[in-house]
């Protein structure tokens, strides 16, 4: 296999995966915006949820040690 064939295949692969990667990036941006707006609208609930999650994780970690 020569260098140009390898480069062409690499270019084809890059072109094939570009669209799904861009779509995933856009979904992540959208999810991030939704999460930020939810946190701004419900800061107390988010804080209580974070505290509860931290408590549960600490209890699980303490059991294993």
Image (tube, helix red, strand yellow):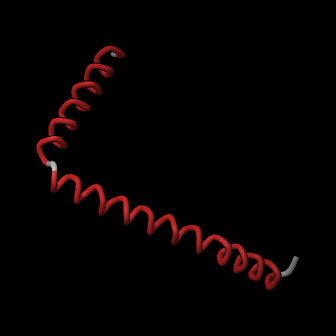
Q: Residue at x 37, y 59 (%)?
A: 31
Q: Please, which residue is most extreme toward the left here?
A: 44
40 relative to 20, above or below: above
44 relative to 23, above or below: above
Q: Residue at x 21, y 36 (%)?
A: 49
Q: What is the quadrant of residue 34 in the picture?
A: bottom left
Q: Please, which residue is most extreme toward the right here?
A: 1
Locate the C terminus by quadrant: top left
Q: Please, which residue is most extreme toward the bottom here?
A: 4
**Residue 15, percent from left and from top:** 66, 78
Q: What is the quadrant of residue 50 in the picture?
A: top left
**Viewer-proximal residue among 38 and 28:** 38
**Residue 19, percent from left and from top:** 59, 73
48 relative to 33, above or below: above
Q: Residue at x 24, y 58 (%)?
A: 36
Q: What is the quadrant of residue 57 in the picture?
A: top left
Count of numbered circles in the view: 0
**Residue 28, percent from left and from top:** 41, 61
35 relative to 54, above or below: below
**Viewer-proximal residue among 1 and 48:** 48
Q: Is residue 64 left or right of residue 46?
A: right
Locate the N terminus by quadrant: bottom right
Q: Residue at x 28, y 55 (%)?
A: 35
**Residue 11, percent from left and from top:** 70, 80
């Amino acid at each position: 296999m020569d260098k140009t064939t390898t480069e062409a295949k690499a270019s084809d692969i890059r072109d094939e995966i570009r669209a799904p990667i861009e779509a995933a990036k856009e979904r992540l941006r959208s999810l991030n915006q939704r999460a930020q707006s939810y946190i701004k609208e419900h800061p107390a609930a988010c804080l209580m949820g974070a505290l509860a999650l931290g408590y549960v994780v600490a209890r699980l970690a303490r059991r294993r040690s």
